[in-house]
Image (spheres, helix red, strand yellow):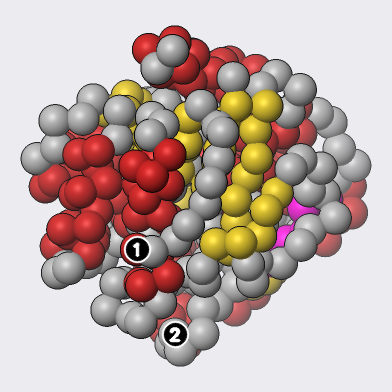
Amino acid sequence: MKILLISLTNNIQSGGGNLTHELCMFLKGKVDFTLLLPWDEKRYDYTSYPVEYILPSYIFDTRNFTIFKYLFFKYKTDADIIHSIFEFPYALIADRISRKNNIPLIIGLAGTYAVKPLFVFPDNLLLKRAYNHAKSMIAISKFTADSVAKYSKTKTPIDIIHCAVNFERFSREYFIEDIKKKYAGKKLLMTVGALKPRKGHDIVLKALAILKKERNDFHYIISGNNEKRNTYADELNEIIKSGNLEENITFAGSISDEDLPRYFSAIDIYIHTPIMVNWNFEGFGIVYLEAGSARKPVIASNSGGTLDAVISDKTGLVVPEGDINSTYYAIKKLLDNEQLRKSLGDAGFEYAKEHSWEKIGEKFIDIYKKFYKSNQ
């Protein structure tokens, strides 16, 4: 069985790239596969599987001359199955390769760009065409699956396979004394994610501004880079200033791959309260499982696919999307209740263990086998 994989990146610093890399590492030695990436994608030293850098550059919509490179892309393959790990835009190329080589197409549905293009002409026509041609689609959350089914009206079956977490990496013990010393006497909260409105950093900061009027025993670490042409970081700094939070907040930038598990191990609470902005939404939230792997309780909002990653009142506290007061009360509740932090963290650990690549990865192979056999 030979699989042709298509993705936009294998950069482990991004959610999509991390999923791509981890899937390839899991499949390595189990099935024969080749990964196709854009020609201009950076080459990473950790790439230890077959990659061809031949795809056209990434485009945000089809109102771009590059779309012709997608629609007329030629690739001859003897693969048995083609799997576009993500939907838009590279599923359009996967659709063409599938048709030209007469092999089954599987499309992954990860979140925003599984749904948002369905409202934009002519993206919607091209994406619906690919969805309808696919033998199967794999969504990372029920919310994503339901949204795609509703707005594309496709009859293609949609399976739900949650994101897998590198459980071993985040669950092992790390040296954290330097981090604890740096923030001595403080309970540590952390959010990991690019600085953009849908990630909900502002909700957390506004909740902490309320908390700051009562206490000063906390510190909030924000890990994530500011996007270009984005004033969101300026907005966050204004909230920090007006809320008297200067000494309680650290913008850590992009924490290195080596240090990120150490930070998860060192914190007391992981908090991530995303919101939906113009159909930009959290498809799942692998960070919740990374926190769970480190036995940390989480605070999440009920936005997008987060309820697939967090079990309310079992692995974390779930607050209404965009609700500052509920977020404040959730933070206060966890800060004041060590036993609750431990019980949520322990349950999160078990839930994350069920989402290890050893367990989730086999679900992909089962789908590959299903369509490999049906095509023989």
Question: For this rendering, which residue is in front, 362 or 229?
Answer: 362
Q: Is residue 189 above or below residue 159?
A: below
Secondary element under disc 1, as helix, strand or loop, is helix
Residue 364 spot, x, y in % from top left: 50, 23
Question: How many discs mark residues in the rendered view?
Answer: 2
Q: Residue at x 66, y 60 (%)?
A: 53
Residue 297 spot, x, y in % from top left: 54, 34
| Any part of residue 117 in sight | yes
Residue 24 in the figure: left or right of residue 366: right
Mark nearer the viewer, 1 or 2: 1
Q: Earlier in the sequence, mark 1 or mark 2?
A: 1
Q: Is residue 14 above or below residue 347?
A: below
Q: Residue at x 38, y 30 (%)?
A: 104
Density class for disc 1 (Cα within 10 Å; few <14, some 14-19, many ≥20) is some
Q: Which residue is mark 1?
A: 71
Q: Which residue is mark 2?
A: 230
Secondary element under disc 2, as helix, strand or loop, is loop
Q: Which residues are magenta?
A: 254-259
By secondary structure, the bulk of the magenta-drawn segment is best described as loop
Question: For this rendering, which residue is in front, 214 or 95?
Answer: 95
- Residue 224 counted in the magenta span: no
